[in-house]
Amino acid sequence: MGAPLYISEIAPPNLRGSLLVLEAMSVVVGVVISYWITFGTRYLDGEVSFRLPFGLQMVCSTLLGVAIHIFPYSPRWLCLVGRKQDALRSLAKLRRLPESDNRIQTEWRGIMTEVEYQKILLEKHYPGKRGLTLELLTWLDLFKKKTWRRTFSGINAFIYYAPILFTSMGLSDDLSKIVSGALNVGQLVATASCFFIIDHVGRRPLAILGGIGSMVPYIIMAVLFGMYSDDWPAHRAAGWGCVAMAFVYIFAYGSTYAPLGWTLPAEIFTNATRSKGVALSTATIWLCNFIIGVATPPMIDSAGFGTFVFFACFCGLAAIWAYFLVPETKGRSLEELVKIFDDDTGPEDAEIIGQAVAKVNWDTHDMQSV
C-alpha cells in the first residue's frame, strides 16, 4: 500500500525526530498491552490461559486484514503503475479534500515527481535492466562504497529482558513477571521522554550516551551476579540491586536506541535508497531482537554473569560506533545530509529531480488539456 517513509520527507527538520519517535512508541505500547493481557490470563484453567491472548491477537489481525480492503489504493503505487488520475482520486479520498484543492494538487505532483525521479535514476544507472535483475541490483546499491556507511549507520538491534533474567537473580516466578511488566512500562515512559528531547539534544549525543548508559548497568549486574548468584536468598539486597540496574538500563535504552533505531534510518539515506535502506534496517532490528530472545535463556544457564558481560561489550561497541559513524542529523534537511556523508549524489539528485519535475509538468498539462 505504498512506502511508509513520507513522515521523514514531509516533516519540518526541527520536528522530524519527534514525529519519528511516535513509531517506536507505538511498538512499545503494543508490547506493554500484550504483556499485561498475557499476565492477566496466566491463572485461567487449562489451555485457555494461552489461547485467549493468542486469540485476541488473531482478532486484531483479522480486523486489520478485512478493513484494509476498504482503504483506497496507495497514491504512490497508482503512480508507479501509471494510473495517475486514479492516484489523484485516491489522494483526495485519503485527505478528505476535493481534487482541485491546492494542497491535494501539490502533494499529487510531489508523488509523481518522486516516482519519475526513481524511474529516471534507475534507467540512468541500469539501462535496459528489468524485473528481478533490476530489483537485486537496487538492493546491492545499499552496499556500494558510497552508501555502506549509511547502511550500517541505520542498523540497530535492541536487547530486552524476559522474566527468566529476574528469576535467575533470585526473584520468585510471580514477582519476576510483575517486575518484567513494570520494566516494559518503564521502557514506554523512557521512549516517551525521548519525544521531547530528540530534536533538542540531537541524534549523535543520544547514541553515544545511550551506549555508555546501557553498558554501565550491565557491568554492575555482571559483578553482582558473579559474586552472589550462588546464594541469592542470603543476599537479597544484591538481587534487588540487579533489578534496579535493569531499570537503569531500560531507561537508558528506551530514551536513546529504542527510538533512534527507527529515526536514523529514515533520515540518512538518499531519495534513491531510502525505502530499501529503511526496510533493511527494520528487518535487521527485528531479526536481532528474535535472536536475542531465543539465545538469552541458554546463555544465562551456561554463561551466567558472562551473559551480562557479553551485552555490556556490545553496548560499549555501540557507543564507539556512534562516536565514529553516526552523523548529527538534527535540524538538517534531507538534502543537507548528503554533504555530511561527503558523497557526490547531491548534484546528481538535483539534475534528475529537475528532469522529473519537467516530466510531471508536461504530463499534468496534457491531462488537464484532455
Image (spheres, grey):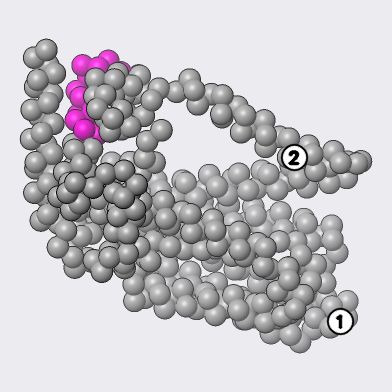
Task: Look at mark 2 in the image and give the residue it sits on.
Answer: 53
Is residue 286 shown left or right of residue 202? Answer: right
> At label 1, which amino acid type do we have?
Asp
Q: Within the image, what quadrant is residue 304 found in? A: bottom right
Where does the image place residue 186, in percent across and percent down from the top left? 62, 56
Q: Which residue is situated farthest in the bottom direction here?
A: 227
Determine whether the residue tagged by mark 1 lies in a helix, strand or loop: helix
Where does the image place residue 141, in percent across and percent down from the top left? 29, 59
Image quadrant holding the C terminus, namely top left
> At label 2, which amino acid type do we have?
Pro
| Mark closer to the chain start, 2 or 1 | 2
Q: Is residue 120 above or below residue 107?
A: below
Q: Nearer the viewer, residue 332 or 310?
A: 310
Where does the image place residue 357, in percent across and percent down from the top left? 11, 37
- Residue at 55% across, 47% down: 27
Is residue 278 shown left or right of residue 180? Answer: left
Task: Look at mark 1 in the image and give the residue it sits on.
Answer: 231
